[in-house]
Image (spheres, coloured by chain):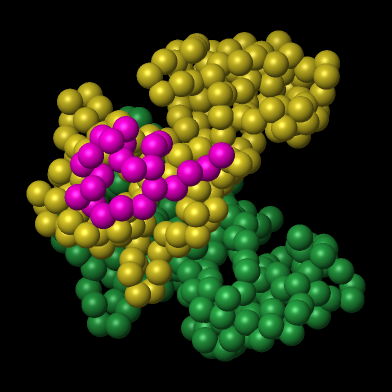
Chain colours: A yellow, B green
Amino acid sequence: MIQQAEVVVYDRLVSADILALANDQAEKIYVGKQLDYHCVPQDQINQLLVDKALEGKRVVRLKGGDSFIFGRGGEELETLAEYGVDFEVVPGITAAAGATAYAGIPLTHRDHAQAVQFITGHVQKDGKEMDWQAVAQSNATLVFYMGLKQSGYIADKLLTHGLSAEMPCAIIENGTRPEQRVFRCGLSELRMSPSKQKVQL
Amino acid sequence: MIQQAEVVVYDRLVSADILALANDQAEKIYVGKQLDYHCVPQDQINQLLVDKALEGKRVVRLKGGDSFIFGRGGEELETLAEYGVDFEVVPGITAAAGATAYAGIPLTHRDHAQAVQFITGHVQKDGKEMDWQAVAQSNATLVFYMGLKQSGYIADKLLTHGLSAEMPCAIIENGTRPEQRVFRCGLSELRMSPSKQKVQL
């Protein structure tokens, strides 16, 4: 599918190896996202996909992880549907699954967690506060995407709502990449700024 | 990796196409699981992996979906670790992600769901009841694995704990396979036995 694309629209998390699969002649458009800096606003990405498709081009939208789990794939797809553009979604391995597999941490386990919850680390987005009570009581493995900056806040909320200070936690950086790093600690230690922690992240 | 395996231990959900990737000479052992019938008990599977590995064989354990999300991969891995068997985990696309991608249903969406929760459909396992209040309040897309038989019970619990009767639901059967079928309804309609529903599942 990548090889047949005439246009490839890709994000920061797409590795060079994957991008190299594309045809040399294909137009490659970077719309990468960094943590605090969106190179191209989402509505412009949506429109770009439509414009290229309406030019008759075969477009591949390349994203890291799974585009339907905090990837805003739903918004891009809605725009395509509005304009009557046919599309196909190829699911990916979402960061939570990939990073924990490489770290040897099962997301569910008969003896420990009967569910798993993926939560955006931007926990105070738009001023709405999460229902921390519900999250803390869920008996689920909790995975916070992009949660590093908010890790102290997340830990405080979970401790306040009854989770144990010793609850095992892991911070995973560069998940599934050769440079992946895993920092394990108890929940109370997540409060520390990562820069103060023994293992620099 | 599959091609290099001397032993392939596989489940029911592994398709013939995938299995065909294995070397003709490889020993292929079926330990398949059906919904209500475990062909081989989990502890025997764990031991089988260890035994074959200790014979010096290169073993691939093939599972559908993601072995760390309701796949009991964690238990297999623990046994391997106990016996000092080296292993590598290759993450897969879990059923929730694969099936919804093929159905065009984003698991998270900026406007609708800020989180997603994967829950086992065996909701009363071992007599322990889930915290339905927490689940219903989570503002997460809820995905129940193997939830068809319990769908009426799940719907009742969610309705009792405050979710709307019109909350959009989908039942997905044979996710990601050519014969995938999707039945969409409101939460209150999940109460009906699937056999009574317009679309037979």
Q: Is residue A137 visible?
A: no
The part of the image, by quadrant, that contains residue B127 is: bottom left
Q: Is residue A91 left or right of residue B27?
A: left
Residue farthest to the front, as pictured? A198
Q: Is residue B56 left or right of residue B122?
A: right
Q: Nearer the viewer, residue B186 or A195?
A: A195
Q: Report the residue at 18% width, 30% height from top.
A: A128
Q: Is residue A22 visible?
A: yes
Q: Nearer the viewer, residue B120 or A12?
A: A12
Q: Report the residue at 23% width, 48% height from top.
A: A189
Q: Nearer the viewer, residue B83 or A47?
A: B83
Relative to A21, say whether B132 is above or below.
below
Q: Position of residue A41 (x, y in %)?
A: 45, 13
Relative to B148, say whether B96 is above or below.
above
Q: Position of residue A162 (x, y in %)?
A: 12, 57
Q: Position of residue A125 (x, y in %)?
A: 25, 27
Residue A184 part of the magenta segment = yes
How many numbered discs sit on the rendered protein?
Answer: 0
| Quadrant occupied by the C terminus of chain A | top left
Relative to B29, say whether A102 is above or below.
above
Residue farthest to the right, as pictured? B24
Q: Is residue B4 left or right of residue B69?
A: right
The part of the image, by quadrant, that contains residue B33 is: bottom right
Residue numbers of the magenta segment: A179-201
Q: Is residue B72 left or right of residue A22?
A: left
Residue B190 part of the magenta segment = no
| Quadrant occupied by the N terminus of chain A | top right
Q: Position of residue A142 (x, y in %)?
A: 32, 52
Q: Report the residue at 82% width, 23% height from top.
A: A23
Q: Report the residue at 31% width, 53% height from top.
A: A185
